[in-house]
Amino acid sequence: MPHQNQPGQVFVTGTGRCGSTLVSELLREHPQVLSLSELFNHLTDMYRLTARVFPEGKVTAGEFWGILSSRNAVNRLLTTHGLAPKEVLYRPSPATRFQADTGIPAVLLTTLPHLSETPDELYDELEAAVAGFPEAVVGEHYARLFSWLCARFGKSLWAERSGGSLILAGQFRDHFPGARYLHIVRDGRDTALSMSRHNGFRMAAVVMALHLTLGHDPYAEEPAGAGERDLGFVPEELAPFLPERFDAAAVRDYRIPTSLFGTYWSDEMKRGMEAMAALPPENVLHVWYEDLLAEPGEELRRIAEFLGPDFVDSDWESRAAAKVGAPSSTWRDLPAAERAELDEACAAGFSVLAAHGVVPRAGTATPTAGTTALTAGTAAPTAGTAAPTVGSGA
């Protein structure tokens, strides 16, 4: 738990496309909660640059500001070509300081616009505040940053939510030992379907495929010899995704099987539940998106009680519950063959959840009868079957 007079620490985590964006929006309405959105997603440029964002040893204020203000390659290309996911709130215009072609600082893409209608001004305030931070390990820098923002906005608890941040559970445990976790879970088949239609997840999957093909990340800062890159081993359909050949139409049109994202969901659920199980049970609350849709008032009360008795607020619960709406699509509308492949890909993830006793109370997110590997304790995919690591949005 945080020290006295320090704000509470909560991570809203999940696989991405699981409903955590909705939860982040609802928490923003709570009078005592500072809702931090997509910070670690954008700092890591879709979880590619985690070592840079969580460096070892002590970090100066200038080095920490360099992390926060980084302008990263994948996000820059998506923004420049009009492909930025809707979670990106900073939209360049003649009235904004930063433009798409020059890049937008990572902390400005979503985090600061989520907090303020004048994000450029808040960015300046933040830069001045960080300049006074003493040298420290990076976890202390982040905690100091979040405490400053809580004080700036008069909040008593921060809740950071980055779509797909379940992949960072280990780093969060190491750098925020007192944090608690609100784990949002959604039917893996609907999650995978949403991933397959999300530019961030689609791009991340392709970049990982390029990384595996080339033996290096083509979107690394200042890629060596990009203009002389050997494309002999790059499949023709992936060439338009290279930074020097980027084609926005290719991103929109490229077909990635929904079942691939289902396999990714299962693999992330296995790793994520192992990480959650290592935490004190009282520090974790699992909330199913389907339960939130079915009984928003009851689920919001559970969330408030998890945050602490001082956060139970019937007015907030009523306001927030009124903003919960049904999703626009479902995996059940897919063609039968695609539906069967997706169901099979997600079976192991459902088994992992069941083995940990994490099942929806609404009873809506359940495996299809007849699918293999459905019983609790069934093995999740082996290392050789894991899908590429992807992550963006929620």
Image (cartoon, rainbow, N blue to C red):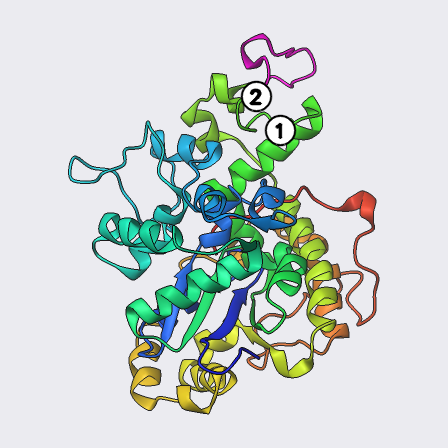
Pick the residue in front: 5 or 225: 5
Labelled disc at residue 217: 1
How packed mark 2 is, by other alpha carbons closer than 10 Å (few <14, some 14-19, many 20 or more), is few
Identify whether 50 is placed above or below 147.
Answer: above
Residue at figure coordinates x 21%, y 53% from the top left:
118
Q: Percent x, y for residue 223?
A: 57, 21
Amino acid carrying label 1: it is Asp
- Asked if the residues shown at circle 1 and circle 2 are in contact, with their CB atoms under 8 angstroms apart, the answer is yes
In this rendering, does residue 325 appear at all? Answer: no
Q: Which residue is mark 2?
A: 223
Helix, strand or loop status at disc 2: loop
Q: Is residue 390 left or right of residue 70?
A: right
Indicate yes or no whether the magenta region holds residue 230. yes
**What residue is shown at x 35% (from left), y 88% (from top)?**
313
Task: Say which element carries label 1.
Answer: loop
- Front residue of this view, candidates 43 and 191: 43
Of 244 and 148, nearer the camera is 148
Mark 1 and mark 2: span between their CA atoms?
Answer: 8 Å
Q: Amino acid at mark 2?
A: Pro
Instruction: Find out whether residue 243 is within the magenta segment.
Output: no
Picture coordinates of residue 264, whole percent (x, y) = 66, 50
- Prevailing secondary structure class for the magenta stretch in the rendered image: loop
The stretch of residues the image draws in magenta is 224-238
The residue drawn where x is 46% and y is 91% is 309
The tag earlier along the polypeptide, 1 or 2, is: 1
